[in-house]
Image (tube, rainbow, N blue to C red):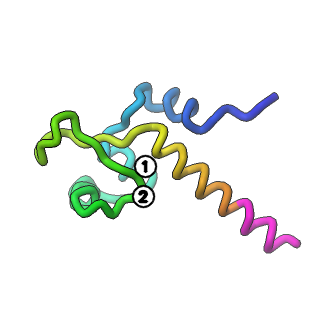
Amino acid sequence: MSKMPTETRLMLIHGNTHIPLETVAKEYLNLSPEVARRKASAQSLPWPVISADGNKKSPKFVSVSALAEWLDQIESKAKDEWARVRN
């Protein structure tokens, strides 16, 4: 049996191709909505943040594909470190 891709799992969990920034920041970075918005404005989050109309007050979202890519990179680094320590 093959592993379900991270992007597919995230879409099943969140039910959409884009997840509200506040949700992603809280669940994956333990950031408050205010800090997340500040970091998004400074482009200092690990993935791009989008809004429907580019307005600063519009809701912000993270694409599932960008989040999945980031999570896969973190998992790969963790596995490499785990294997290095065990050998």
Q: Is residue 83 magenta?
A: yes
- Which residue does the numbered mark 1 point to in the structure image? 27
Please state which of residues 32 and 46 is positioned toward the viewer in this rendering. 46
Of helix, strand and loop, which one carries label 2? loop
Label 1, secondary structure: give it: helix
**Is 74 one of the magenta-colored residues?**
no
Instruction: Please rate how many residues cluster around mark 1, counting C-alpha atoms within 10 Å: few if below 14, some from 14 to 19, many from 20.
Output: few
Q: What kind of residue is marked 2?
A: Pro
What residue is drawn where x is 36% and y is 37%? Answer: 19
Residue type, mark 1 in image? Glu
User: Residue sitting at 41 percent across and 27 percent down?
Assistant: 16
In percent of width and height, residue 34 lies at 21, 57
Q: Which residues are magenta?
A: 79-87
The secondary structure that dominates the magenta segment is helix
| Residue 44 percent location from the top left of the image | 33, 63
The image quadrant that residue 84 belongs to is bottom right
Residue found at x 46% / y 44%: 66
Q: In the rendered view, tell whether residue 32 sits above or below residue 82.
A: above
Q: Give the percent coordinates (x, y) of residue 41.
A: 22, 58
Q: How far across and how far down the image is residue 22, in percent?
A: 30, 47
| Total marks in image | 2
Q: Residue at x 23, y 39 (%)?
A: 51
Q: Quadrant of the C terminus?
A: bottom right
From the viewer's perspective, tell me whether residue 57 is left or right of residue 16.
Answer: left
N-terminal of the pair, mark 2 or mark 1, is: 1
User: Left or right: where does residue 26 sit relative to residue 55?
Assistant: right
* Quarter-of-image position of residue 46: bottom left
| Res. 46 mark | 2
The extreme right residue here reads: 87
